[in-house]
Amino acid sequence: MVINDELSQAASAKADDMFQYNYWAHNSPSGKTPWAFITAAGYKYIYAGENLARGFTTTQSVIDAWMASPDHRANMLSSNYQDVGFAVKSGNLNGEDTVLIVEEFGNLYMPVAKNAPQEIAPAKSTVASVPAPAAPVPVVQKTVQAVSKNPLINTSTLSSNIYYVFILVFIFALFLDMIIIEKKKVMRFVGHNIDHILYLLLVLSLVGIWSKGVII
Amino acid sequence: MFNKILLRHNIYYLMLAVVFCLSFLLAYSSTDRIFQIGVIVATTLFYVLWGIMHHLLNHDLHLKIVVEYILIGGFGLAMIFFILSVNGNH
């Protein structure tokens, strides 16, 4: 696949639209489809697709999530697409600061199936049976040369990790307290530590789920 | 020792665990943020009230126990809201 400016513009417009109209979906509340953004950017597609991600903190985690999802993986590996465009935008969605990642796929021409011998038959029959093949288009491969330097501290994951550790230490302290008090048979009027441990485990589970990004 | 505590209050703790599991499943399966927050707030309220009720039934309810449950409930909610505001996913 080749990075396409028009698809990147479409992805950017889609991300802006989601922030502007406060929605998280492939179709906008007014019924605008992803294809409308692609067409508006000037990309006259034959095939098009879209992957969305939200709330991820690293590139690798987005790729892993998309590759783990059959539908998103199919988009990324499909031979139907030859172009791709990305947009990564941060903003406020429904009152929450978040990062949206939009990936638009497209193909301007009818793809030729690699394993279909009838379509790569001799020139005469090809012309007769297959729609006129597109004239060879010079494809400009863009090479992105950038210096990638990971930050020493990822502030977004750091805050989540601090919370994990804090809750775990809290749970451990409550558990230890429960054991010591029971062992020494100390009488005191305090809440039940098992209640607190169960509640904190619920919080920990939800923090674990919600600190990861989601894809649609 | 741990089992003794569990056995003594097993029904109470079992109920609490069941409600927490249901709450987790509801919050996990939904993509509606308002609904998720509603579930968590309702679960926290249940945790506080259930804890107070348990102590009331055991005749060992004190003001500091009420404060303890409210503080831990508040701490849990604060943590959830902070994570949601930082990551802003779903």
Image (cartoon, coloured by chain):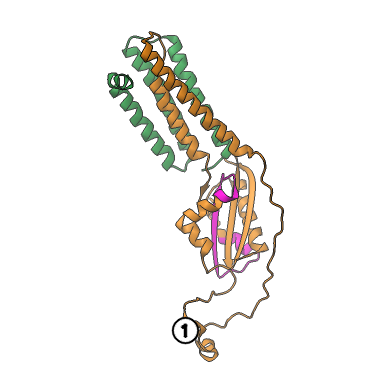
Chain colours: A orange, B green
Q: Amino acid at mark 1?
A: Gln
Q: How many marks?
A: 1
Nearer to the camera, B56 or A32: B56
Residue A51 forms part of the magenta stretch: yes
Measuring from the top left, give residue A70's x and y in whole percent. Answer: 45, 57
Residue at the location (52% across, 32% down)? A164
Q: Is residue A194 visible?
A: yes
Q: Is residue A145 above or below residue A120?
A: above
Q: Is residue B89 above or below residue A17?
A: above
Q: Is residue B31 left or right of residue B52?
A: right
Measuring from the top left, give residue B60's x and y in whole percent. Answer: 36, 9
Snapshot quadrant of residue A35: bottom right
Q: Is residue A185 left or right of residue A117?
A: left
Measuring from the top left, give residue A90's x and y in whole percent. Answer: 64, 45
Measuring from the top left, give residue A182's x and y in whole percent. Answer: 36, 14
Residue denoted by label 1: A118
Residue at the location (60% across, 71% down)? A108
Q: Is residue B10 left or right of residue A28?
A: left
Q: On the rendered image, what quadrant is the N terminus of chain A found in?
A: bottom right
Snapshot quadrant of residue A7: bottom right
Residue at the location (65% across, 64% down)? A4
Residue A208 forms part of the magenta stretch: no
In magenta, the rendered stretch is A35-61
Q: Secondary structure at mark 1?
A: helix
Chain for mark 1? A
Nearer to the camera, B32 or A177: A177
Q: Is residue B33 visible?
A: no
